[in-house]
Every structure is written in C-alpha cells, then in structure tokens.
Amino acid sequence: MATSTARRAPTVLSVVGARPQFIKAAVVCQAINARPSAHRPRHRLVHTGQHFEPQMSEVFFRDLRLPAPTHQLGLGGLSPAKQLGRMVEALAEIYERQQPDAVIVYGDTTSTLAGALAASLCHVPIAHVEAGLRSFNRRMPEEINRVTTDHLATWLFCPSDTSVKNLAREGITDSVWMVGDVMIDALTQTQAAVTSGSAQTLRRWELTPQGYYLATVHRAENTLSAQEVARLLRTFEGLDRPAVLPLHPRTREVLRAAGWRAPMTNRLRLLPPVSYPDMLILERSARAILTDSGGVQKEAYFWGVPCITLRNETEWVETVATGWNRLVGTQPGSIRAALEQLPDPVRARPRPVYGRGNAATKLVNVLFAALQRDRHV
Ligand code: UDP
C-alpha cells in the first residue's frame, strides 16, 4: 500500500484480540524494542476486543508490559460471523488511514483471519506468526482461520519443522521461515518469576506439588452443550487427586446459560481465568495437565509435565511423538485410563522442538530486513 521511498521507519501494525495473542505479541514487541532505534519499525497494537474481560485482556497487558493499543475495536461478544465481518470493516478503515507497511497477525483466531483479510483487501503485506499448523479437521474454526491466513500471508513464521512441511504440502514455500515458537520465548522469559513465585501461589490455593491435576476446557467442540461440559467436570471431580480448573469465559457462559451451578468442592476447584505467571506455576507443579488448549499442551511439554489432550487430534504433533502428550478425547473412561498410565515425573526437560526462546528476535530481523529492502529505509 505505502509506495513512498522516504527514509522514515516503516510502520507495522499488530492485530491482537485473544488471550494467547497478547502473550505472542508481547515478545514480538520486546524484540522490536530491543533493536537499535535507527532499525526499529514504528509498531502499533490494534485490539479487536475479541477477549474483553479484564482477566482475559487487561491483566495480560499489565503483566507482560504490553503497550496500550492505539486502537480498541470493542468487538467482543458477537457471533463469529458477525464478529469477523465487523472486524474486517473496522480494520480496513484503520489500514486505509494508517497506511502501514505490514500487518502482523498471530495464531488462529477470528482476529487473525480478520486482520489478514482486511490487509489483503487493502494490499498490505501480512506476516503470520505461528504459520503452518494443521489439525486437518476443517470443522474447527481455528483450522479455517489458519489455513486461510497462511494462503494470504506474505511472510510465514513457523514454530516447528512439521508446520514448514504442512505449508509445502499446500504449495506454500516462498518466504516460509522456521523461527521457532514465540510462546517458548514468553515461557523462557517468565521462568524466573515462576520459580520465585511458586511456593506462594501454591499456598494461596492450598495446593502441593504433584498433589493435583490442572485442567482447561474451552474448544468449541468440547463446549457445544452444558451437558457435555458438566460431564467433563464430573469426570474431573471423580479423579484420584483434586482438579484445578481456571474456567474460560466461553465455558462459564455455556454453563450459566443452562442454569448449571458449578459446584466448588475440594475435588474440583473452579477458578476464574488466572494470570499468565500463575498459570505457568499451576502447570509446572501439576501431576498432569488435562487440556484442549493448544498453548497449554506446549507448555506442559516445556515443563516436562504429562499432558492428556481432551481432543482427537493436535497441531502440536511433536508433543505426542515424544510421548509427553496423549490424545485421549473426552470420554470419562479414556481419561481415567490415561491417568492410570501416567509416566513418572522426571526433571529432565524434553527436547526443545519449538526453538530455544529466540523466535521473536528471528522473525523481527527477517521482517525488518524485508521492509528495509522494499522501502530503501
Ligand atoms: N492461560 C492463562 N490463564 C488461564 C488459562 C490459560 O494465562 O487461566 C494461558 C496459558 O498459559 C497459555 C495461553 O493462555 O499461555 C493459552 O491460551 P488458550 O488456552 O486460551 O488458547 P489456545 O492456546 O488454545 O489458543
């Protein structure tokens, strides 16, 4: 879109809207700010409002020291189709006004796809962070979001060798960069806080290391009905250790709409969404993690905590291949059987298949070099 060759710093917009995107964008922001000022793009955040509750948004901006967004679209709480349409419209207006040199989109949410669609309509080059992941399940909204975004993107920043291969299978080989996973950067940077804060956080919830399971549930396929969610919660409640479950707003809403009052018992501890450092602490000390979250599967792998994935497929296939993660689905019997065969806790960390914590620096270097080349900055 911008055709001037004036020697000003290129402008880059990051589109974020959902919890994991705040974490990913935070490390990209840091990598940009770490560049010498003459080689730093002007970087602005646009918040679509997909996640808008303070515990899902504000808390992350504070803890991860994300700069305040320059634009807040406030488009939370709509149906996915309506949300997508409104976001595309609003983002296209912003792109027209700001004339960015590139837009960065993260992961696989409605905000990712909207950011990419609006950019392609406005002829703005797109950088996709976490490109090439596939579940090969087209019923997942995330799969549609990521496939479409990859096919629109100019730069594709992959978190794993598998994601590079997935793109090649779809004929995408230009400007594909295996940089590693930016969430590993975030984890690595938060590790010291996890170590120093563990004892206090566990005390706050009266938990002991290895003495509980950590669970998360929010995927559309697992929250179709309150009955299904309730069945999962009853399974968690009947396990041999207490289960701690920070409840995603989507899951809470499904239960609330059905008038289901979640019990708060010693066996099942429902919490509101917790902060990122607290979540990492809960993960690291759990005997096992039961989850349908993509990010949490990787974090379990990073900590070397056994993971039981409440789905039938995963994008993070390396965690399964190395034996740390098992795809179990949501049947109570399968969950209980998987927990009976948990590997013993070990302190040795699994092989770092998602990079060594410098993915953001690598991708920012590639992006800035390309923008410099194009704009003669
Ligand atoms: N997370 C968090 N607090 C919570 C639950 C999750 O900070 O109460 C973090 C988690 O550690 C991971 C990210 O949110 O870094 C994963 O986000 P989510 O499960 O919402 O999305 P997904 O990764 O499935 O796209």
Image (spheres, helix red, strand yellow):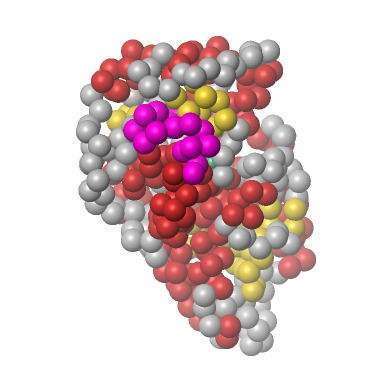
Q: Residue at x 56, y 40 (%)?
A: 274
Residue 216 or residue 313, whichever sits in front: 216
Coordinates of residue 364 in the picture (x, y in percent): 49, 70
Q: Residue at x 48, y 78 (%)?
A: 369
Residue 305 or residue 99, whichever sits in front: 305
User: What stretch of residues is rendered in magenta?
Assistant: 200-219
Q: Residue at x 30, y 30 (%)?
A: 326
Coordinates of residue 203 in the picture (x, y in percent): 48, 37
Coordinates of residue 262 in the picture (x, y in percent): 60, 17
**Residue 195 within the magenta-colored segment of the rendering:** no
In-image side of 319 versus 367 (left or right): left
| Above or below for 28 versus 266 | below
Q: Residue at x 28, y 17 (%)?
A: 337
Residue 178 or residue 45, whichever sits in front: 45
Report the label total.
0
| Above or below for 87 versus 305 | below
**Residue 208 within the magenta-colored segment of the rendering:** yes
Q: Quadrant of the N terminus?
A: bottom right
| Above or below for 19 versus 234 | below
| Above or below for 31 versus 345 | below
